[in-house]
Amino acid sequence: MNGPHDLGGKMGFGPVAPEDNEPVFHADWEKHALGVTLCSGALGLWNIDESRHARESLHPADYYSSSYYEIWVKALESLLLRHGCVTEQELQSGHAREKAIMDKPPLAAADVPAVLARGGPCDRPAEADPAFAVGDRVTVRNINPSGHTRVPSYAKGRTGVIEEAAGAYVFPDDNAHGRGENPQWLYRVVFTGDELWGPQGDPSLTVSIDAWESYLERA
Amino acid sequence: MTNSHDHDHDNEFDPMTARVRALETILSEKGLIDPAAIDAVVDTYQNKVGPQNGARVVAKAWSDAEFADWLGKDATAAIASLGYTGRQGEHMQAVFNTPQTHNLVVCTLCSCYPWSVLGLPPVWYKSPPYRSRAVMDPRGVLEEFGVTLPQDVDIRVWDSTAELRYLVVPMRPDGTEGLDEEALAALVSRDSMIGTGLAGATA
């Protein structure tokens, strides 16, 4: 979706504000936001693509006025509601009022290190030969799905060069919406600054994106 | 209160504390999460997994040409050999700075970041100013970190739009020939492994 999250090349957000000796967390609730998000994700009711889509689906005014952990918490509420883990009444009262929809044991503290160390690899066996080869010139299709996608707007319609065919990976546009993993070849595509930003682009700049095969067409 | 849920039950807390506490309470009461697991997650990223991991990878690459070669060809395996694996580091790629090319990593679409080697991302990495400008005006962004690159150095920006996670291997500072890996690792800042800093500098 052409949502508020799609920030490459946007203007007006001001300078970057690096913080000296930045702490890992800026408030105690941020620790809980991280922990509740990861433990809820371990229920297995949604995948990383669906959770990213929940975050980018916040209203733009809400997205831009929220810190990143606030975005996480708001998106987590919508995921938990969607999957029947909580009700609006429960969120308002702050306590459980109904039985849980599943009786799977929760992620145990003792299992956390192993679960985090394992992660969630999303490479998959390729089901077809890659359509493009290193060195091919490709153009990013001008596609504007209303659902989740990982095409950054600034690259749409732009032409670059395939630098690497990185293997087949779960296709997020489908996976985010329960349509299956449908793995596709993933390519690293490199663009010049001039191609992306016109004559005022930095002549010393190149930018790469990682693009699934269906995002691309031969130039 | 102005947030969407009126937490009158715990109005002694600030709105986000109340909101997260409500979620945690409901899910715990339903047996869907174990509060002790939350503590274990936080302990992992506060005390165990952080940029000290990436610094060890870089220091080894500086010290061991064979390891650097492996890191360039199969970063996931080379990094795993040092014990760093897992969430948001499943598919790693190391990108090496050279006198000709400086690498900079961003995620314009969200906050993708190599957790297994750098830990959780800093606030600025997840915020609109960096995400919007890194791909368009990287030299301007670098100036805000106090880094000025010579005009004849090319800049390559890696937008993490998929599940590949990038670790910048900064250039080894001059005058460090006699240092062991531990001393070298101390020169490798988090920002130098994102590309918003140089090794040997603080931050």
Image (cartoon, coloured by chain):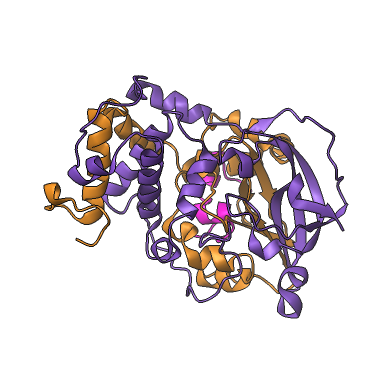
Q: Judge from the rendering whether residue A175 lies leftward or rightward of residue B38; answer left or right.
A: right
Snapshot quadrant of residue B151: bottom right
- Residue B136, image x, y percentages: 64, 70
Which one is nearer the viewer's eye here, B156 or A121?
A121
Q: Residue at x 49, y 54 (%)?
A: A56
Q: Residue at x 30, y 34 (%)?
A: B39
- Residue A155, image x, y percentages: 70, 62
What secondary structure predominates along the stretch shown in magenta? Answer: loop
Snapshot quadrant of residue A93: top left
| Span colored in magenta | B177-201
Specify whether residue A80 is in view: yes
Which one is nearer the viewer's eye here, A182 or B79?
A182
Q: Judge from the rendering whether residue B112 lies leftward or rightward of residue A96; answer left or right.
A: right
Hue used for the chain lettered B: orange
Vertical relation: B191 (above or below) B134? above
- Residue B89, image x, y percentages: 56, 38
Q: Judge from the rendering whether residue A145 lies leftward or rightward of residue B121; answer left or right.
A: right
